[in-house]
Amino acid sequence: MARVRTPSPAIKTADQRIIGLNGISPNLDLGDGVSVASITDLRDKAKALLDRHNAVVSELGILSNQLTEANKALNTLNSRALALVRGRYGVDSNEYERVGGTRQSERKRAPRRPVQPA
């Protein structure tokens, strides 16, 4: 299953602000560390981090799929091993119980319920 990559509304807003501020003046400095250059630098850093984040999310999706497939294969092999031990040693053997099966003699049957008259 593909994982969702995170969009960044802050980066989109910064792009709009940069376009608007560049329309006023490409070298606009509003003071207190707010300028076209400072917004552009921080936007670029945030975009690089977002790209890295999305790459890791994508890799995580691949690893998750691989883990799911490995677990399916392992479950199949576990079932086959139990069935082969049951076939070789029987359903009431100590060997069958040793590999995780429930011996037939240890299973309890449900008592019959009497039929209720209508």
Image (spheres, grey):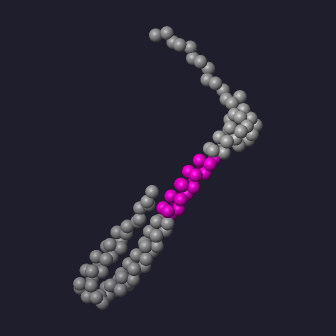
- The residue drawn where x is 33% and y is 76% is 14
Queried whether the magenta region covers residue 65, the answer comes back as yes
Residue 78, given in percent of the width and then of the height, sits at 63, 47
User: Between 31 and 116, which is closer to the camera in this rendering?
Assistant: 116
Relative side of 100 to 35, left or right: right
- The residue drawn where x is 71% and y is 43% is 99
Per the rendered image, the range of residues in magenta is 60-78
Location of residue 22 by image quarter: bottom left
For the image shown, how many numbered marks are present on the structure? 0
User: Between 32 and 10, which is closer to the camera in this rendering?
Assistant: 10
Residue 68, given in percent of the width and then of the height, sits at 53, 54
Which residue extends farthest bottom?
27
Which residue extends farthest front?
88
Is 88 situated above or below 19?
above
Is 34 situated above or below 118?
below
Residue 1, given in percent of the width and then of the height, sits at 45, 57
- The residue drawn where x is 28% and y is 76% is 16
Queried whether the magenta region covers residue 64, the answer comes back as yes
Q: Is residue 88 visible?
A: yes
Q: Is residue 32 visible?
A: no
